[in-house]
Image (cartoon, rainbow, N blue to C red):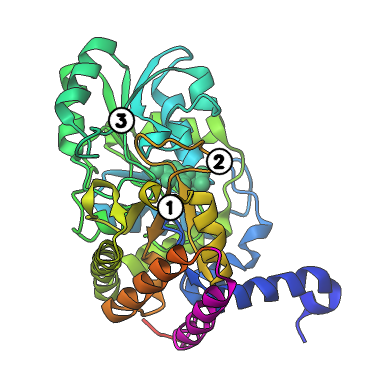
């Protein structure tokens, strides 16, 4: 029996319940994934016992010789993966990576131009509720109301008018390809720096399935736990000239001791992302999303922007007279986890929302392909068309569970 089960049965049982939920359900949250067994193993090690403030070769604590080697491996692998000149692997999260960039190049009150939250941006890009929105002078761009895509002409006009010090691009809920070069050029034209936050799409950028901002925008930030499929955390990449200011902003600017067990797990994730298997995975994520989106369209649901180029699609539920909140609850009862999401021009409040966001990274890691995605799209439509019909929803749940049991989270032990 495990020591955790003996020492803390309450936590042990809750972990087991969550394990069962993940095994038996379809996780379609676009920002989630299932880490490799080896990533999980690195996270659960004695590396968590150590303080290693500072950077390799320049620590504020003794006994860091192995930590230096681990962090160097993580940095080198990340640079190799994205062709970056410099990488910082210490941010504890995507939000902290973004905040460290702001700290490195802005003063309180400086101006940021970024994508608004209700048009697909992220809280940490200057939302009034976030520290970024309280400390800086923010102006927002959104998507064009007709095409529901970014309009670079309009963004350029806004940049000329508002003269930002930093232009932020990258999104949490934007199903289309982002032109990072266009953003970098607009920033250069108005004398601003640029930051691309590829938290969602980093796994597509490093495999050539989406253009990469690394070396194009001044800074690139990412989480490591979404399409990249690593432990929860953040990273920053930039050219050598900005390396020192970024490193200082992360430590001692934003954080104390790095989470060395997580940095080791990030290194394992980067190694995995360099393999051909991972490239195949990333391709399949995009293919699966296209099939899921097309199936929903065939079932008369409208997709924001009419489709998807990446790992997620946004469903507009306004024509069906249901809110994102109601859809999230009904699908949850069927073992299908999605999140309600604001969509451009929505009528409902951000708590109710008029849409849901659906992503394929997790089901693709489990081995599901186009055939299963078509089936899942049909199940989603069935639930949403019978939102008050508990019997239909229970029937879908049974089918969902039997599909999921064919695709275990951790099928076999691998060797590289
Ligand atoms: N940036 C983007 C675009 C995101 O979508 C997210 C998270 O969803 C973050 C940053 C923040 O990441 P974290 O939750 O690790 O702070």
Asked if the magenta segment contains residue 401, the reply would be yes
The answer to whether mark 3 and mark 1 are in CB contact below 8 A is: no
The answer to whether mark 2 and mark 1 are in CB contact below 8 A is: no
The 10 Å Cα crowd at callout 2, few under 14, some 14 to 19, many 20 or more, is few
The 10 Å Cα crowd at callout 3, few under 14, some 14 to 19, many 20 or more, is many
Magenta part of the chain? 388-412
* Rendered image quadrant of residue 214: top left
Give me the residue at 18% from left, 40% from top: 179
Q: Is the residue marked 1 within 8 Å of ligand 1, measured from its CB? A: no
The Cα atoms of the two marked residues, 2 and 1, are separated by 12 Å
Q: Quadrant of the N terminus?
A: bottom right
* Rendered image quadrant of residue 44: bottom right
First-in-chain label (3 vs 1): 3
Residue 90 visible somewhere in the drawing: no
Residue 380 visible somewhere in the drawing: yes
Residue under label 2: 351
Q: Please identify, in this view, whether the residue under mark 3 or under mark 2 is nearer the observer.
A: 2
Q: Position of residue 294 (x, y in %)?
A: 24, 65
Indicate whether 366 appears above or below 270: below
At numbered mark 3, what does the secondary structure look like: helix, strand or loop? loop
Residue under label 1: 356
Give me the residue at 18% from left, 22% from top: 156
Q: Position of residue 351 (x, y in %)?
A: 55, 40
Residue under label 3: 142
């Amino acid at each position: 029996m495990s020591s955790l089960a003996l020492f803390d049965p309450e936590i042990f049982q809750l972990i087991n319940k969550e394990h069962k939920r993940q095994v038996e359900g379809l996780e379609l949250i676009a920002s989630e994934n299932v880490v490799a067994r080896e990533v999980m193993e690195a996270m659960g090690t004695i590396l968590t016992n150590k303080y290693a403030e500072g950077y390799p070769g320049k620590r504020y604590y003794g006994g860091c010789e192995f930590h230096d080697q681990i962090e160097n491996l993580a940095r080198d692998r990340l640079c190799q993966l994205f062709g970056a000149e410099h990488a910082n692997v210490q941010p504890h999260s995507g939000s902290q990576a973004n905040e460290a960039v702001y700290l490195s190049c802005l003063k309180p009150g400086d101006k940021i131009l970024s994508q608004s939250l209700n048009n697909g941006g992220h809280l940490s890009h200057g939302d009034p509720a976030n520290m970024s929105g309280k400390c800086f002078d923010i102006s927002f761009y959104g998507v064009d109301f007709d095409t529901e895509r970014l309009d670079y002409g309009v963004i350029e006009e806004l940049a000329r008018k508002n003269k930002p010090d930093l232009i932020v691009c990258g999104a949490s809920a934007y199903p289309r390809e982002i032109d990072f070069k266009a953003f970098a050029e607009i920033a250069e034209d108005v004398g601003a720096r640029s930051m691309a936050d590829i938290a969602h799409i980093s796994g597509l950028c490093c495999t050539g399935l989406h253009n990469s901002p690394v070396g194009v925008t001044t800074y690139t930030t990412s989480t490591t736990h979404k399409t990249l499929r690593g432990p929860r955390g953040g990273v920053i990449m930039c050219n050598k000239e900005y390396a020192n200011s970024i490193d200082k902003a992360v430590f001692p600017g934003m954080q104390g001791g790095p989470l060395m067990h997580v940095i080791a797990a990030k290194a394992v994730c980067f190694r995995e992302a360099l393999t051909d298997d991972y490239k195949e995975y990333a391709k399949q994520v995009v293919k699966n999303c296209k099939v899921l989106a097309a199936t929903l369209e065939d079932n008369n649901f409208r997709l924001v922007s009419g489709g998807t180029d990446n790992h997620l699609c946004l469903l507009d539920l306004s024509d069906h007279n249901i809110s994102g909140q109601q859809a999230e609850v009904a699908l949850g009862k069927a073992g299908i986890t999605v999140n309600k999401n604001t969509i451009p021009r929505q009528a409902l409040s951000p708590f109710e929302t008029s849409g849901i966001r659906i992503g394929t990274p997790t089901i693709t890691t489990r081995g599901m392909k186009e055939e299963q995605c078509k089936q899942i799209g049909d199940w989603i439509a069935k639930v949403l068309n019978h939102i008050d019909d508990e019997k239909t929803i229970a029937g879908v749940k049974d089918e969902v569970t039997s599909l999921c049991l064919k695709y275990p989270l951790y099928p076999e032990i691998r060797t590289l």
